Image (spheres, helix red, strand yellow):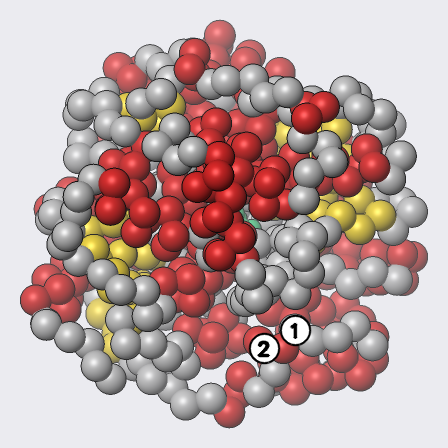
């Protein structure tokens, strides 16, 4: 199984090469040919512990890795980093099923992939005989940055540079990043929003090819580890008797760059009985409109919301879905992406829209509904959720509970977004997120994750800030520096 560019303008490469390169040279995203996807034997997976399950999924999607090799990498990657050996536990509140993806080192779901990506990347580089240092460039809407920094810090042969939108992340998210230690890490603010930061990074990839890679979900090595927890959730729902083996299970995914939900689609293609995939958005509802009409139109106001990791109008991984559902029609994908870049919108052919709608549904909600969801779930189920998960919960309200059980992907700890959680619970925090975290813990008794404790008092180590137009120059300058000792 090779990985081809979704835009067809550069040669197909091995899975190891795709991970090392990140983005294809023609600007497309490395994606497998849908006809090459194997079907996994579900009955052989349901009783496996997480590393063994992960190894089966990884080996199926990344043929350069054998199952034993993948298992060893997964064990090393997650050991001591997650606060539960289940890695991604499924909580059944009696009414709703929440897949808790935030028990890793930075309390967001991105840890699941970003703890493993450095291991996949160094192993891939070794397979290719690569000796040169790799510079990882990452644009973050808040959570990827910290998770990538934690994943890659002090990994030999790799440096990592993270760009975040200066005014687009929460105080907790910013503090997590600017206090990051490590001899190979750098963090820089961008005077713009996430789309500016992400477009800047893509631009740098198009200008500078050598020695760069990405920790964003444009890297297939980011996506593949996320496929695993759909299987883990399904297995947990079977074991607890919520569903019978073989019965479909819906998944609702708070969505930004379309990476997490695309992993769910891939799980279905590997044979997992996935019912509907419900795409949940905040006021940045470009995906809701797209899934309902087939028209993707980013020419709309950008909203800063209480769920900032989903404040995105250019959803990168949708390109992969178009490629997969059009059976690898790279000419179509290339022309749609060119139109998006030039005109700001595109419309997919009817046949493609029908396929999308047979698998996906989409809903959005505003900040008021987000806060109301946190309050209602706490009051009725005594279960505390973050703002992103709250958007997912509202989507399930709209989707309905009469269409079979639905797993809501819980993508972050509520302690990462204390302002909104305090508002929902009626706790005063006077705009101080750190005081808010303590108030939540006192009031709910839900333990604060240890990595977030004491955050306010850690030393700020990164203060750089650039305009979007200066990102390339900044990267070239930093790349040329022999070391980054702080
Ligand atoms: C990144 C993120 C999302 C969106 O995930 P995508 O893969 O970009 O769709 C949702 N919730 C949280 C908390 C995140 O950090």
Q: Is residue 376 above or below residue 398?
A: below
Residue at 11% across / 47% down in the picture? 210
Residue denoted by label 1: 449
Picture coordinates of residue 286, whole percent (x, y) = 49, 38
Relative placement, left or right, of 25 versus 294 is left
In the image, residue 308 sits, relative to residue 319, either above or below, namely below
Mark 1–mark 2 contact, CB under 8 Å?
Answer: yes
Question: Mark 2 vs ligand 1: CB under 8 Å?
Answer: no
Q: Place residue 248 in its image quadrant.
A: top right
Question: Residue 328's image quarter?
Answer: top left
Q: Badge 2: how crowded within 10 Å, few (<14), some, or many (20+)?
A: some
Taking 310 as reference, is 124 left or right? left
Q: In this view of the protein, can residue 472 be seen by the observer?
A: yes
Quadrant position of the C terminus in the picture:
bottom left
Q: In this view of the protein, can residue 145 be seen by the observer?
A: no
Q: Which residue is mark 2?
A: 452
301 versus 402 height, above or below = below
Where residue 445 sits in the image (x, y, percent)?
83, 77
Q: Position of residue 83 (x, y in %)?
A: 65, 65
Q: Position of residue 262 (x, y in %)?
A: 51, 33
Describe residue 267's horizontal placement relative to residue 6 as left or right: right
Other-residue count near label 1 (Cα within 10 Å), few / some / many at <14 / 14–19 / ≥20:
some
**Picture quarter with the N terminus:** top left
Q: Residue at x 10, y 72 (%)?
A: 482
Q: Residue at x 72, y 32 (%)?
A: 46
């Amino acid at each position: 199984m090779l990985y081809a560019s979704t835009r067809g303008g550069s040669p197909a490469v091995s899975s190891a090469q795709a991970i090392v390169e990140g983005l294809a040279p023609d600007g497309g995203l490395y994606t497998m040919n849908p006809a090459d996807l194997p079907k996994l034997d579900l009955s052989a997976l349901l009783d496996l512990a997480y590393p063994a399950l992960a190894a089966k999924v990884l080996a199926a999607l990344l043929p350069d890795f054998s199952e034993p090799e993948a298992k060893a990498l997964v064990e090393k990657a997650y050991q001591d980093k997650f606060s539960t050996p289940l890695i991604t536990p499924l909580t059944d509140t009696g009414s709703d099923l929440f897949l808790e993806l935030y028990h890793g080192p930075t309390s967001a779901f991105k840890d699941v992939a970003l703890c493993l990506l450095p291991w996949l990347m160094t192993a891939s580089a070794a397979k290719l005989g690569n000796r040169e240092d790799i510079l990882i460039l990452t644009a973050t809407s808040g959570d990827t940055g910290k998770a990538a920094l934690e994943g890659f810090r002090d990994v030999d042969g790799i440096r990592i540079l993270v760009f975040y939108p200066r005014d687009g992340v929460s105080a907790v998210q910013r503090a997590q990043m600017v206090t990051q230690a490590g001899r190979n890490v750098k963090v820089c603010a961008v005077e713009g929003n996430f789309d500016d930061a992400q477009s800047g990074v893509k631009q740098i990839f198009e200008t500078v090819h050598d020695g760069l890679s990405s920790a964003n979900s444009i890297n297939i090595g980011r996506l593949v580890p996320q496929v695993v927890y759909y299987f883990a959730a399904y297995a947990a729902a079977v074991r607890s008797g919520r569903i019978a083996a073989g019965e479909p299970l819906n998944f609702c995914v708070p969505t930004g760059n379309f990476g997490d939900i695309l992993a769910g689609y891939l799980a279905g293609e590997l044979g997992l009985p996935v019912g509907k995939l419900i795409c949940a958005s905040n006021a940045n509802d470009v995906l809701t409109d797209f899934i309902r009409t087939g028209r993707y139109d980013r020419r709309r106001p950008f909203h800063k919301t209480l769920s900032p990791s989903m404040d995105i109008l250019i959803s990168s991984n949708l390109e992969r879905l178009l490629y997969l559902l059009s059976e690898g029609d790279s000419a179509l994908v290339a022309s749609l992406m060119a139109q998006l870049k030039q005109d700001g919108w595109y419309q997919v052919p009817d046949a493609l829209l029908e396929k999308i709608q047979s698998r996906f549904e989409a809903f959005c909600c505003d900040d008021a509904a987000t806060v109301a969801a946190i309050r209602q779930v706490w009051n009725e189920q005594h279960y505390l959720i973050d703002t992103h998960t709250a958007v997912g919960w509202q989507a399930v309200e709209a989707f309905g509970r009469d269409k079979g059980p639905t797993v809501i992907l819980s993508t972050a700890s509520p302690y990462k977004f204390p302002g909104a959680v305090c508002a929902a619970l009626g706790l005063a925090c006077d705009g101080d997120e750190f005081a808010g975290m303590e108030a939540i813990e006192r009031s709910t008794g839900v333990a604060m994750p240890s990595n977030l404790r004491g955050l306010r008092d850690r030393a700020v180590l990164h203060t750089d800030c650039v305009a979007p137009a200066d990102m390339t120059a900044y990267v070239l300058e930093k790349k040329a520096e022999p070391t980054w000792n702080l």
